């Protein structure tokens, strides 16, 4: 199984979230949300070994090979959750009802590849859309291998298994470069938006997939630091090891596809072209001004990504 593109992956995630959000809305917050922190300086975050197992998680589909592309309309074929039985329109009213049941929720797309996925989720659930800018800290000679990640406000996640093989000056140089790029992207994508405020809200963090999980881990840490009452991580596909770590850190994990053999996120998409800055800016502008519910926020046909 594989997705046609990021937009179709977002459609599948929206359908999966309709199973989780009504139950989540009925439950009290799983913990007292931390006070928002805006102080300077890095904060290293390592996956806790004693973190509680989240009470909600969608059941993944196991797929050892990507055989069939899943289009945006295929989400309608998934069985409806009992709470949503009888509601009209699997891609319409039921999804919007799920979003309405969870007050103060917000969908956060991880830049850049997660934003088209998040835009589809937000539009189908009728929830506000924003971006969360994080930067992977890649090994200098193998950038796709992460020794950590950075987020706004100085939050930093370490991947000790990789970092232990690197020298401190090498890591410091990468961190300086990625911190500058993070600041540049925050300025470009937010375009006058106020700083992200999550105090008391449910943050639905969306990416296009998890490989090492370092980027998602720093996103969860950032949401916590900004005071989110709950953090839901929603991704279309993930490696088994990474999803196990994130299930110890997020309150809820939604991942329809956790293959037994995981090579790369791109393996599970028919179209995995790079998402450009212009697409992110357009999706953010459309998500802010269109106010659509159930429509694609940039006016394109579901199941396509423009780069």
Image (cartoon, rainbow, N blue to C red):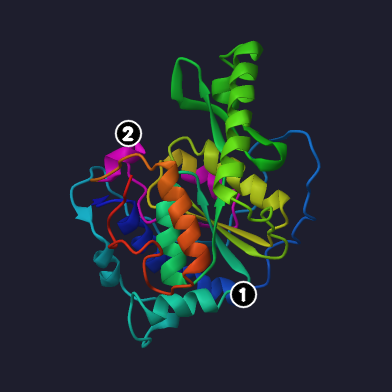
Per the image, the residue denoted by label 1 is 103
- Residue 185, by quadrant, is top right
Q: Nearer the viewer, mark 1 or mark 2?
A: 1
User: Residue 52: where, in percent of width, then height?
Assistant: 64, 53
Whether residue 30 can be seen here: yes
User: Residue 99: where, in percent of width, then height?
Assistant: 51, 74
Quarter holding the C terminus?
Answer: top left
Per the image, the residue denoted by label 2 is 263
Q: Is residue 85 left or right of residue 136?
A: left
Segment colored magenta: 243-269
User: Residue 230: where, in percent of width, then height?
Assistant: 64, 61
Residue 207 lies in the magenta-colored region: no
> Real-space Cα distance between discs 1 and 2?
37 Å
User: Residue 255: where, in percent of width, then height?
Assistant: 42, 54
Q: Nearer the viewer, residue 47 or 37?
A: 37
Q: Residue at x 66, y 65 (%)?
A: 201
- Residue 60, by quadrant, is bottom left
């Amino acid at each position: 199984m594989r997705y046609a593109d990021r937009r179709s992956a977002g459609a599948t995630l929206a359908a999966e979230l309709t199973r989780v959000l009504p139950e989540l809305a009925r439950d009290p917050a799983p913990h007292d949300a931390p006070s928002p922190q805006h102080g300077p300086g890095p904060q290293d975050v390592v996956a806790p070994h004693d973190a509680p197992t989240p009470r909600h998680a969608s059941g993944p589909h196991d797929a050892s090979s990507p055989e069939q592309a899943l289009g945006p309309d295929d989400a309608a074929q998934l069985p409806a959750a009992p709470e949503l039985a009888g509601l009209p329109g699997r891609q319409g009213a039921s999804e919007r009802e799920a979003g309405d049941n969870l007050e103060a929720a917000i969908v956060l797309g991880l830049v850049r590849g997660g934003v088209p996925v998040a835009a589809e989720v937000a539009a189908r659930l009728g929830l506000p859309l924003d971006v969360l800018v994080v930067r992977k800290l890649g090994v200098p000679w193998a950038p796709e291998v992460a020794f950590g990640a950075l987020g706004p406000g100085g939050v930093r996640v370490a991947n000790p298994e990789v970092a232990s093989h690197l020298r401190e000056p090498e890591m410091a140089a990468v961190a300086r470069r990625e911190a500058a790029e993070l600041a540049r992207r925050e300025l470009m994508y937010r375009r006058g938006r106020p700083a992200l405020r999550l105090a008391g809200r449910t943050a639905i963090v969306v990416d296009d997939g998890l490989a090492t999980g370092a980027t998602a881990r720093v996103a969860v840490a950032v949401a916590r630091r900004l005071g989110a009452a709950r953090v839901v991580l929603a991704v279309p596909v993930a490696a088994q090891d990474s999803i196990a770590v994130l299930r110890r850190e997020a309150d809820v994990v939604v991942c329809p596809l956790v293959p037994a053999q995981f090579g790369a996120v791109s393996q599970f998409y028919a179209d995995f072209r790079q998402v450009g800055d212009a697409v992110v800016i357009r999706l953010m502008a459309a998500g802010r001004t269109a106010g659509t519910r159930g429509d694609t926020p940039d006016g394109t046909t579901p199941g396509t990504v423009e780069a």
